[in-house]
Image (spheres, helix red, strand yellow):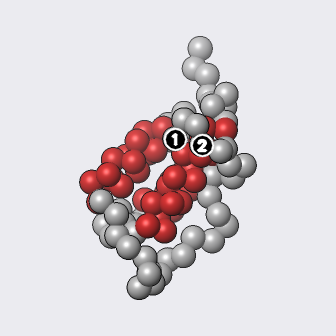
Amino acid sequence: MLDCNSSIAPADANIRNEVTKEDEGVDPTMFRRLIGSLRYLCQSRLDISYSVGIVSKFMSNPHKTYFLAAKKILRYINGTLQYGILFP
């Protein structure tokens, strides 16, 4: 994800809560690792806290829709690497 296009917002305004038949499942272990890493990053990047909280609700039954939402957060982080909180 280092060479991906950056995003201007960490998440879409409305993430679907329902899953359609077209949605395929993703590897739950990989999805949980990604969400765990994003939760850890929330300690210094408060601008992604809301988006990570929304995507975290779907850790028990991850689908491609939620994985793409998590990847959008990563794209946002890639575009805003200079943001953060400094603890002198």
Q: Position of residue 10 (x, y in %)?
A: 63, 52
Picture disc at residue 63: none
Q: Amino acid at mark 2?
A: Cys
Q: Position of residue 68 (x, y in %)?
A: 51, 60
Picture disc at residue 1: 1
Q: Residue furthest left?
A: 29
Please name the residue that numbered disc 2 is placed on: 4
- Asked if labels 2 and 1 touch by Cβ distance under 8 angstroms, the answer is yes
x 67%, y 44%: residue? 6
- Crowd rating for badge 2 (residues with CA inside 10 Å; few <14, some 14–19, many 20+): few
Residue 34 visible (yes or no): yes
Q: Amino acid at mark 1?
A: Met
Q: Position of residue 42 (x, y in %)?
A: 51, 41
Displayed quadrant of residue 47: top right
Q: Provide the secondary structure element on which disc 2 rests.
A: loop
Q: Residue furthest top?
A: 88
Q: Is residue 72 above or below residue 44?
A: below
Q: Is residue 68 above or below residue 39?
A: below
